[in-house]
Structure formats: structure tokens, C-alpha cells
Image: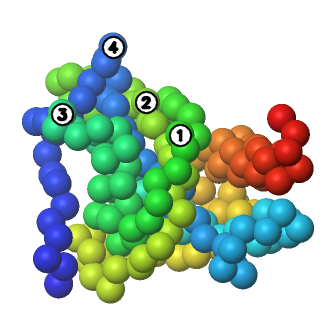
Amino acid sequence: MSDLVARTGRLHQRYNDGCRLVAGCIPFRYRNGEDSSNDDPESNIEVLMINSQSGPGLLFPKGGWENDETVEEAAAREAVEEAGVRGDLMDLLGYYKFKSKTHQDEFCPEGLCKAAMFALLVKEELESWPEQSTRNRIWLSVPEAAQSCRHAWMRVALVDGFLKWHADKFVERDEKRDGSD
């Protein structure tokens, strides 16, 4: 049993223009233990996904952004609560809008959500975490993850957000090594 406790309820969550604000991340690691620009990122990178509690398919950890935390803190918290991982929260990958069928409330009757998604370089996998009794985690290659995504917006966040961010990261790193800008 985990000593950590997952936050529940909607009382302290943030809303903006009829949208519930959500924070999440794409947890990742390198198969060979380091990022190497010589390797194809789709074969060298693994991403961590979790099962959905409401149907088939896999998800990236995400959840409501609460009033007492920054969006970065919310994304890191969700990674711990839902997937049992900690690491270095890297850059914002983008904002993704979606409609939730299961989370409609008085502040968001249409179920509209806006998710801020980040890259999270995993440094630690916890042996126990708050949602371990209802969540399974699995490491997948990027192509496997893209096929397994329960929601199209998460696939877009992975392919158009994460992979583009990762490619840009290598260009910046290589330019710094070469001394060019």
C-alpha cells in the first residue's frame, strides 16, 4: 500500500471559459540509458502508458489542475498518482482540447477540457503508488504507444508534440556542440 494519497474531487480544480484545465505528461526513457542522436528516436525511446479505468486502450497520466499548484506541479503529481513515476519534468509539449464523456459537472456541463502536456524523463519507478490497485503501467515503443492510445488527442500529443519536441531538442544540442546557432 502506498503512503501517498491521490487527490480526489472537483472542488479545487481550475476552469477557464467553460473548460476544465488538465495537466499531464508523456513519461519516457531511453532504451540504452541515454539520448543518442545516432539512434532513431522511435526505436530508442520508450514511453510509459497506463490502463484506462473506463474502457479499452491506454493513456498517459493526466488529471485536474488544482488551485493550489502550478501546472507543472499538477503534471508531476499526476505522474506519481496514476503511473507511480518521478523524474525531470521537461518542456511543455502543447495544449490539447478534448471532450470528456465521464467528467461533466456544473462548471463544465459540456465536458470540455484543455490539457497542458509535458515531457517527463523518468528517473524513478515507485514500487507502490496511490492508484496501483486500479492502474497498470506498461513501457512501449513510440509506434506501439501511438497504436494503443485510447484517445486521438493523446496520439497527437505523442506524435506531433513529443516527437517534434524531441527532434528539436537534438537539433539544439547539436548546434551547441558545433558552436553554430
The answer to which of marks 3 and 2 sits earlier in the sequence is 3
The answer to which of marks 4 and 1 sits earlier in the sequence is 4
Q: Position of residue 59 (x, y in %)?
A: 49, 58
Residue at (10, 36) in percent of width and height = 11
User: For mark 2, does the 10 Å Cα neighbourhood hold few (<14), some (14 to 19), or many (20 or more) residues?
Assistant: some
User: Judging from the image, what secondary structure is the residue with disc 3 in?
Assistant: loop
Q: CA distance from mark 3 to mark 2?
A: 15 Å
100 left or right of 5 in image:
right
User: For mark 3, does the 10 Å Cα neighbourhood hold few (<14), some (14 to 19), or many (20 or more) residues?
Assistant: few
User: For mark 4, does the 10 Å Cα neighbourhood hold few (<14), some (14 to 19), or many (20 or more) residues?
Assistant: few
Q: Are marks 3 and 1 in contact (CB under 8 Å)?
A: no
The residue where tag 4 is placed is: 17
User: Judging from the image, what secondary structure is the residue with disc 2 in?
Assistant: strand
Give the number of the disc on residue 67: 3
Residue at (43, 30) in percent of width and height = 114
Q: CA distance from mark 4 to mark 1?
A: 21 Å
Q: Are marks 4 and 2 in contact (CB under 8 Å)?
A: no
User: Judging from the image, what secondary structure is the residue with disc 4 in?
Assistant: loop
Residue at (85, 69) in percent of width and height = 39
Give the number of the disc on residue 114: 2
The nearer-to-camera label among 3 and 4 is: 3
User: Judging from the image, what secondary structure is the residue with disc 1 in?
Assistant: strand
Q: CA distance from mark 4 to mark 2?
A: 10 Å
**Dot 1 amino acid type:** Leu
The nearer-to-camera label among 4 and 1 is: 1
User: For mark 1, does the 10 Å Cα neighbourhood hold few (<14), some (14 to 19), or many (20 or more) residues?
Assistant: some
